Amino acid sequence: MFSEQHTKQTVEFNLEARRKAFEKPRAIMGIWEAMELLNTLVDASDPDTDATQIEHLLQTAEAMRRDGKPEWMQVTGLIHDLGKLLYFFGSDGQWDVVGDTFVVGCAIPTEKIVYSDTFGDNPDINHPIYSTKYGMYSPGCGLDKLLISWGHDEYLYMVMKEQSKLPKAALNMIRYHSFYPWHRERAYTYFESEEDKQTLKDVLSFNPYDLYSKSDERPCAEKLRPYYEGLIAKFFPEKIRW
Ligand code: FE
Ligand code: FE
């Protein structure tokens, strides 16, 4: 998975994936319906979780609720992996949906990325601009300007930015939750803007719930549904264009 992701995630692929994702809606579904569809995905090799998809989403949200986190954050936990619907929309495999993300269009900070030896066949590493430290960006430009490798994070971010009432912090939690080289290893700090100090705080406050709620007991979707439908109604339209 890593070597495929590291080989095929190029600038060209990235731009094309963004374009294709929003050419026309590929499904019109409410949030809960989307959760149920995602749950039909039985993928034992999903590196994100061994619970079912819906259990993982509910566990993340429930752990936040238990800690008294605000409603917007609970609902962010509830939906954060819905970008994996990409699996149903013609993705090529895991490499274009899941996995730690990195920046395309600039050099790979090799010491801060797992399996960084597998970028050898990525054509961008020989590109005159993309192979340089700052690549197509400039220092301090802000994370927002970077093309992050394509997958469930960026896709869901783009959907929610247009169609939800989620605050900026929530959108950033969604967008950067798999960006481990940045939020954990502290690579790419030279691209951060002043504002990104807050982005980092937000993403780090989200991360433990994604990681460690997995050991919690299995949530009962039907019992929890009324509570979460109430929250969903506050932040999302009845139907989302996926
Ligand atoms: Fe995820
Ligand atoms: Fe997750």
Image: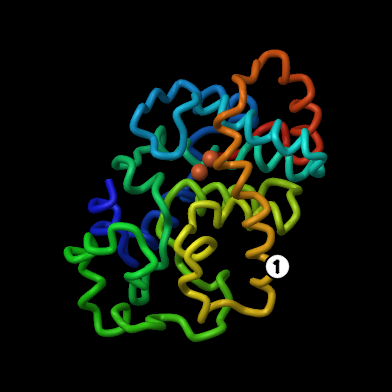
- The relative height of residue 222 versus residue 209 in the rendered view (above or below) is above
Could you tell me which secondary element the residue under label 1 belongs to? helix
Q: Quadrant of residue 193?
A: bottom right
Quick check: is the Cβ at mark 1 less than 8 Å away from ligand 1?
A: no
Is 209 left, or right, of 44 in this rendering? right
- The relative height of residue 228 versus residue 159 in the rendered view (above or below) is above
Q: Farthest residue toward the left?
A: 121
Where is mark 1, residue-wise?
198
- What residue is at 40 percent from the left and 45 percent from the top? 97
Q: Nearer the viewer, residue 227 or 17?
A: 227
Indicate the position of residue 231 as horizontal and vertical percent values. Answer: 79, 33
Q: Nearer the viewer, residue 156 or 26?
A: 156
Q: Nearer the viewer, residue 56 or 9?
A: 56
Is 139 left, or right, of 13 in this rendering? right
Q: Amino acid at mark 1?
A: Gln
Q: How many marks?
A: 1
- What residue is at 70 percent from the left and 34 percent from the top? 63
* Quadrant showing the C terminus: top right
- What residue is at 39 percent from the left and 48 percent from the top? 99
Judging from the image, the colouring scheme is rainbow
- What residue is at 55 percent from the left and 52 percent from the top? 177
Indicate the position of residue 50 as horizontal and vertical percent values. Answer: 45, 28
Indicate the position of residue 2 as horizontal and vertical percent values. Answer: 28, 51
Indicate the position of residue 21 as horizontal and vertical percent values. Answer: 45, 49
Q: Residues within 10 Å of mark 1 (few under 14, many from 20)?
A: few
- The relative height of residue 218 versus residue 26 in the rendered view (above or below) is above
Q: Quadrant of residue 210?
A: top right
- The relative height of residue 236 versus residue 192 in the rendered view (above or below) is above
